[in-house]
Image (cartoon, rainbow, N blue to C red):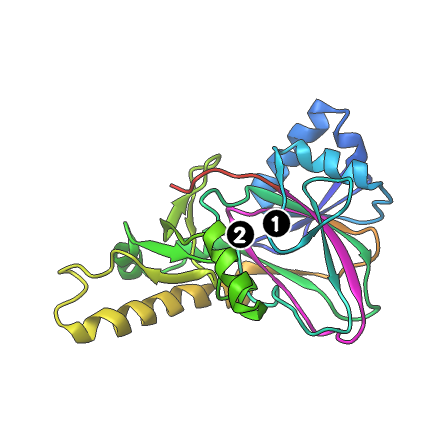
Amino acid sequence: MRIKPLTCSIGAELTNVNVADVVRSESLFAEIKALLLKHRVLFFRDQDISRADHVAFARCFGDLEDHPVANTVPGYPGLIEIYKSEKRDHFENTYHSDASWRANPPRAAVLRCISCPDVGGDTIWVNMVEAYNSLPEEIKTKIAGLRAKHGIEHSFGAILATEEREELIRKNPLVDHPVVRTHPETSEKVLYVGPFSTHFINYHSPENVRFGQDKTPGASLLLNYLISQAAIPEYQVRFRWEPNSLAIWDNVATQHYAVSDYWPAPRRMERATVRGDRPF
């Protein structure tokens, strides 16, 4: 197996390896898991594998889960279809960590390209450990101990009818997570806010709010500043898809952005999502 780092901060491409073989080799899995923790996202080309192989590889990292909005591939629980056609209903072209609106957000995800445009449709991943480490010390002090609410309503719920949106919210109520979470395997600190973050829940303290004027504007400006860190190129890697390309990423340590520059060309992807734990 050959390992080629793609940037100084995040991402590596692995060649001379087939992910279907990982299921049958404990040593190969251990090596790939260690590389994932180091590089945050791993890329593989020419993975002409079956859906069963895709699911089996993802299950090496943990149990899988479906999505309340995206379609599950029939016969393959935990494998969802991400199909973009002539409709302009893209949700993924914003920096985000998958399903932070869950009480237990996903640990990792494995995405495979089935078909894609000749040009366009890249995906960007961001190292949110580096994003936290590079914050000014006064900001780190200010956000230590802060928590933020995360919700599905204002993203996936935005295009639903009122009754459907209310049902989505009922099944997926707001949750709160630490603004700076700890990686469960590496103990690194991770900046953990994004487009699913609606507001801080414990900002209104004597240290932060002297007058009412300080409360909402101060919290909103700070939250927007933190969310904007994902857009810094020095923390990023950008990947161009081809059919049978595959990526696995650490959903705790990263955010990603699916560039939606290929409309009206279609793109078909399939993703297996690994269950995670409650952030701490």
How many neighbours does mark 1 have within 10 angstroms: few (below 14), some (14-19), or many (20 or more)? few
Q: Mark 1 points at which residue?
A: 67
Amino acid carrying mark 2 in the image: Ala
Query: Residue 220 location in percent, x, y?
Result: 33, 70
Asked if residue 27 lies in the magenta stretch, the reply is no
Q: Which residue is drawn at 67% across and 33% down?
A: 59
Q: Residue at x 47, y 60 (%)?
A: 196
Question: Which label belongs to residue 99?
Answer: 2
Question: Relative to 215, is 126 above or below?
Answer: above
Q: Do the residues labelled 1 and 2 touch (CB within 8 Å)?
A: yes
Please state, as top left, top right, bottom left or bottom right, where the C terminus lies in the image. top left
Question: Relative to 266, is 275 above or below?
Answer: above
Residue 172 visible from this viewpoint: no
Question: Which label belongs to residue 278?
Answer: none
How many neighbours does mark 2 have within 10 angstroms: few (below 14), some (14-19), or many (20 or more)? some
Instruction: State which mark lies toward you, 1 or 2.
Output: 1
188 or 207: which is nearer to us? 207
Q: How far apart are marks 1 and 2 (CA)?
A: 9 Å
Q: Give the range drawn in magenta.
A: 247-273
Amino acid carrying mark 1 in the image: His
Please state, as top left, top right, bottom left or bottom right, where the N terminus lies in the image. top right
Query: Residue 123 location in percent, x, y?
Result: 67, 61
Q: Residue at x 48, y 66 (%)?
A: 154
